[in-house]
Structure formats: structure tokens, C-alpha cells
Image: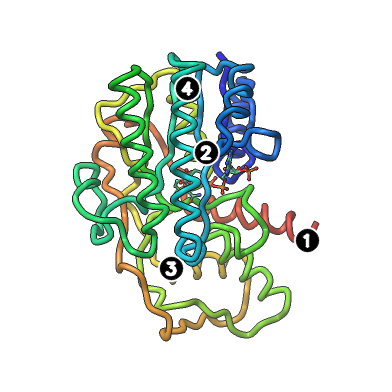
Amino acid sequence: MKIVVIGGFGFVGRAVTDELRKKGFDPVQLSRRNGLDLLNLGDAKSRLESIKPDIIINCAAHSGSLHYITEYAADVVHDNSQIILNLYTIMKEVCPSAKIINPLSNCSYPGNSDIQRESEWWCGPVHKSVWSYGNTRKILKVVAECYAIQYGIRSINFLVPNAYGPGDSTDPNHTHALNGMIIRMHKAKQRGDDVFEIWGTGSPIREWIFVRDIARLFSLVIDKLDSQVDPINVAQEKGYSIKEIAEIIKRLLKYEGRLVFNTEYQDGDPKKILDDTLFRERFPDFQFIDIEDGIRQTIEYYRNALEG
Ligand SMILES: NC(=O)c1ccc[n+]([C@@H]2O[C@H](COP(=O)([O-])OP(=O)(O)OC[C@H]3O[C@@H](n4cnc5c(N)ncnc54)[C@H](OP(=O)(O)O)[C@@H]3O)[C@@H](O)[C@H]2O)c1
């Protein structure tokens, strides 16, 4: 079975690749870094034609911080739409019987939902702060469905909350939120800072997923890509406030400064967690890592990465 992980050197793609290798598969990692640019249809088609994959795990995206995806909204919507259209065009032409797994970020849920249920995914606009990127996740689902109807291409789409874990960038401006807090607090500790500032009240509650849990789930489903519900939440239905996360990181890092909350910055929505009913029905035995263990492993990764 030939598996390709597109975006395979990114945060999620790398974790998926590592997990597949652990399971004895031999996935091919692809991205612009080694010559697969999905914005270039002709070249990308030749590359995938030479592999003829059976499974594609699609971790390619042009994403970034809330600030970034707003400032570059047009580029973000253009590139992601193009990546999606080109990828499905290529599949139709070179590997129509391949299956594809798409992790969709849960920022594509309606902006006003605190418990995110699959049945309500289409029931309202995404939040303005993620307008460009969140809507491209909806485009991905629409394209997947239309290519299933006309060409029989099989996709499975997972709705995934904010990820954290080892393997992400070491630049806090380019990491995912929880990882960024670990980097900043690690540096605050090294400098001996007395206070660590967090933007907002710290009260918003969010659901988090360890990146290796996403990878374990994908490696479980590659043989049996089917789902009655699509997209399906990858959910624990469990959230932690930003303050709770900061306190766990502070304790595990043994940082002795004080956490201060700068309330001049606005909080986002008070709560965003994913309903886990359908996930539990579909994957009753799947165990997620405990958040403290996950944060401990992430701190270890950053200690090594930042201190060399
Ligand atoms: N991280 C999270 O918290 C999270 C949560 C839920 C869902 N997801 C989803 O998981 C997927 C991957 O996210 P991530 O966090 O791993 O992002 P990431 O770290 O930014 O990785 C994205 C990857 O896409 C590749 N890429 C970008 N443009 C490309 C192009 N034109 N052609 C080919 N490859 C291209 C990049 O590599 P090059 O620059 O080398 O091309 C990079 O490897 C996304 O769909 C995201 O929505 C992520």
C-alpha cells in the first residue's frame, strides 16, 4: 500500500509520518520542500503520477496565526482553494481509487457554537477572526463530496481541535497556541522574568489535542476509510481554560514567576469544545493522552530544541 503524506514536513504531517513508520508503513512525505507544490498543477500531477498512491493524508495548508490569516486573507483563501482543487483534480486523473484523509480544523464551525456538534457544522457563518481559513475547510468538504458524487473518490474528513505537541516550529510567532505559550514561558524562565503576561482574562475554554493522538487515529483508519458521519469530530468533549493551561505549563516547567492577565486584550468566545457522542460511537476504544503527559512531552521537546 503506497501512502503519501502531503504537507508531510508540517506539524501534523510529521507526526502522522512518524506514527505510520512506527506501525511498519513506508509513507512518502511530500511538500514544496521536496518539490511537490500543489499550486502548480502540472508539476504536482507528474510527481503524484510517479507514485500512484493508494492513500493520501492531506496535511497541506497555507495557515497561520489569527493575525496572519486576516492580514493575508486573500492569499490564504486563494492558495488553500487552489491546493484543494488541484489535489482532487490530480486524484481524479492519476489515482481515482485512492482514498484521502483530510484533517479539518474546528475553526470551521459556526462562530457562535460553544459545544460543536457535527449536525450543526453548516448552521452558521464561521467567526470573522478565522473567516479566510475557516471557510476553506468548508470548501474542502464541498469539493470532497462533489468528487465522490461524480468520480467516486473516497474521502474521510475529521474535525480536529487545536493541536499541541512535539515537532512544531520553535518560533513562537509560527507555532500553535499552546506550544507558543510553552516557548514563551521557557524563555521567561531562562531570563528570570518575575511575571509572565497572558493576553485576556485567561478564562476562555478550549479543547486541545496532542498531535500524536491525531497521528494514532489516522494510522488506525487508513485500512477502513468509511464513516456514516462526515465530517466527524475527533473529540474528548473536554476543555481547559487558558489560565488552567498556563498553570499546568508553569508547574511542569518549574517557572517561579507570576502569571498576569492583561485584560486590555479581548477574550475570544468563552467556550469551544467538541461534542464527542459520534466519535465515541465510532471509536469506542480510542484513548487520548492525559493533557499533563502531553504537555510534559512537549516541554521536553522544546527543552531539547531550544537548548540544543
Ligand atoms: N495544527 C493544528 O492545531 C490543527 C488542528 C486541526 C486541524 N489541522 C489541520 O491539519 C492540517 C495541517 O496543519 P499543520 O498545523 O500541520 O500545518 P503546518 O505545520 O503549517 O503544515 C502545513 C504543510 O503544508 C505544506 N504546504 C503548504 N503549501 C503547500 C503547497 N502549495 N504544496 C504542497 N505543500 C504545501 C507545508 O510545507 P512546505 O512549506 O514545505 O510546502 C507544510 O508542510 C491543516 O489542514 C490544518 O487545518 C491542524
The mark closer to the camera, 2 or 4, is: 4
**Which residue position holds label 2?**
59
Near mark 2 (Cα within 10 A), the count class, few <14, some 14-19 or many ≥20, is many
- The reply to whether callout 3 and callout 1 are in contact (CB within 8 Å) is no
Residue 229 image offset from top left, x and y in percent: 25, 31
Position of residue 110 in the picture relative to residue 304 (left or right): left
- Which numbered marker is on residue 242? 3
Does any atom of ligand 1 lie closer than 8 Å to the CB of label 2?
yes
The mark closer to the camera, 3 or 2, is: 2
Q: CA distance from mark 2 to mark 4?
A: 15 Å
Q: Earlier in the sequence, mark 2 or mark 1?
A: 2
Q: CA distance from mark 2 to mark 1?
A: 29 Å
Q: Nearer the viewer, residue 43 or 174?
A: 43
Q: Earlier in the sequence, mark 3 or mark 1?
A: 3
Q: CA distance from mark 3 to mark 1?
A: 26 Å
- The reply to whether callout 4 and callout 3 are in contact (CB within 8 Å) is no
Residue 127 image offset from top left, x and y in percent: 31, 61
- Which numbered marker is on residue 76? none
Residue 89 higher or lower than 273, as above or below: above
Name the amino acid type tagged 3.
Ile
Name the amino acid type tagged 4.
Met
Residue 35 image offset from top left, x and y in percent: 69, 34
What is the secondary structure assignment of the residue under circle 3? helix
What is the secondary structure assignment of the residue under circle 2? loop
